[in-house]
Amino acid sequence: MKPYKIVFAVAFLVCAGVQAQTPSAYSAFNFGILNEFKSARNIGFASSGVTLDDADFLNQDNPAALSRIELTKVEAFITANGLTSSNSQGLKKYYAYGELGGFALGFPVYKPWGIGLMLGLSPYSNARYNMKSTDNTNPYFNTATTETSLRGGLNDLHASISFVGPYDIKLGVKFHHLFGNTVFSSKMTFGNSDVASAEYSTEYEDHGSLITLGLITPDFKYGGLDNIRFGFSIDAKSSIKTDTFLVRVASTVDDTISTGNGTTDIPLKIIAGVSFSFNEGYRGMLEYAVQDWASAGGLRVAGLYTRAYNRFSAGVEYRPLKDQTIDFAKPAYRAGISYEQLPLTFAGTGINQLSVSLGASFAVSYQNHIDIGAMYGLRGTTDNNLLKENIYRVSIGISLGELWFMQQER
């Protein structure tokens, strides 16, 4: 890989934090808000893409897609995010933050058999929450102020392999190592200086493994549609082990009051989609994802507030053609819409999210692109004293390709 490409990729990693975060109040439950975005291109599609197996991009949703890569690929992206949270009384608060969305490195191993390898790191879930409340009802305390915060989530370190099976069916396996550190802290201070403040924190150290199986069917035609294909991705049921620490924070020392451990189920997740080509250079896709978190149990899942996760998404992309092949000298454009039933419910009110997105890719050279994605979403409701969140996200990513290895004829 040329030196400027290495510098470009490293710059993405240096200028952003490793653990992605979200200031959503809804991230205070379970492992946090589940991450559905794996690349800037993925954001432009509203998280669709289980059927995509382009040679130009890495697909982190479906390991079977690696069978198409031709060059060593490096991808990374960062995002600038905004979130406005409001309640039924009209109170609003705006947050802004940046994050590293993910990093992946893919290799073609043996093209005749479609064998490809990929290594990557991305957030699996994001948790960040702050709350401050004041109580003036007790005259002895004068004013009692309570501050609570949550920081953490799960990271996903993964390795994938692909190959082409009988009848040109593309298959893949992805191995995940999930790990993370989440800290919940609560501090109470008083206006009366004779009353000492109190601060406690609970720390969760999570780790576990997960396997994903992927499949992409051969293309076929029907009516006026070309390149029709189906894609499937299945995350097998697994479990997360957790070590817990309850710490009392004093002015001079942190005192670990108690420790413990437990496990939490990660339920089976299925993503199924179909994509097709129409006109010249247009590709559409429909996708559905389901994960029954209501069946999960264990230390880190609040069963009272948990339900099944469902996502419906659709996307379209325009990639200009030249002599019936992709014209890399022109930008590609994409758009998507997604509706998610988040795995959270409160007093019979479920938390849902609707988002729309736009994106584009600009070729620097053959199989080298700069990707841009933008998303606007609505999450939650102000009913039953809940919060409504407006989500803004702008992302820029790189997808770099270079010939690293060449097989010698013998």
Image (cartoon, rainbow, N blue to C red):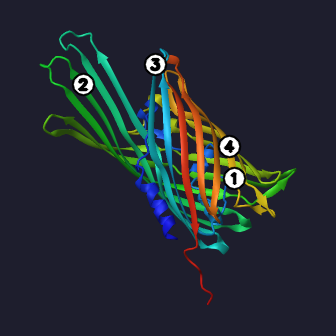
Q: Residue at x 38, y 51 (%)?
A: 207
Residue 6 placed where, x, y %?
A: 48, 65
Front residue (pair 37, 327): 327
Spatial CA distance of label 3 from label 2 is 23 Å
Q: Amino acid at mark 4?
A: Ala
- Mark 2 neighbour density, 10 Å: few (under 14) some (14–19) many (20 or more): some
Q: Residue furthest bottom?
A: 410
Describe the element under mark 2 as helix, strand or loop: strand
Q: Are marks 3 and 1 in contact (CB under 8 Å)?
A: no
Q: In screen coordinates, is 76 left or right of 365?
A: left
| Among the two numbered marks 4 and 2 on one chain, the one whose residue lies closer to the N terminus | 2
Determine the CA span between mark 4 and mark 2: 47 Å
- Circle 4: element type: strand
User: Disc 3 versus disc 4: distance between alpha carbons?
Assistant: 32 Å
User: In the drawing, what numbered circle is on residue 188?
Assistant: 2
In the rendered image, which residue does mark 3 sit on?
91
Q: Would you call the spot at circle 1 few (<14 residues within 10 Å), some (14-19), or many (20 or more)?
A: many
The residue under the point 13% across, 37% down is: 252
Badge 1 element? strand
- Residue at the (45%, 36%) spot, across then down: 96
Question: What amino acid is labelled 2 in the image?
Answer: Met
Q: Earlier in the sequence, mark 3 or mark 2?
A: 3
Give the label on residue 332, or none: 1
Disc 3 secondary structure class: loop
For marks 3 and 4 on the same chain, the one whose residue lies earlier in the sequence: 3
Amino acid type of disc 3? Leu
Q: Mark 4 sits on what residue?
A: 335
Query: Residue 26: x and y, percent?
Result: 46, 31
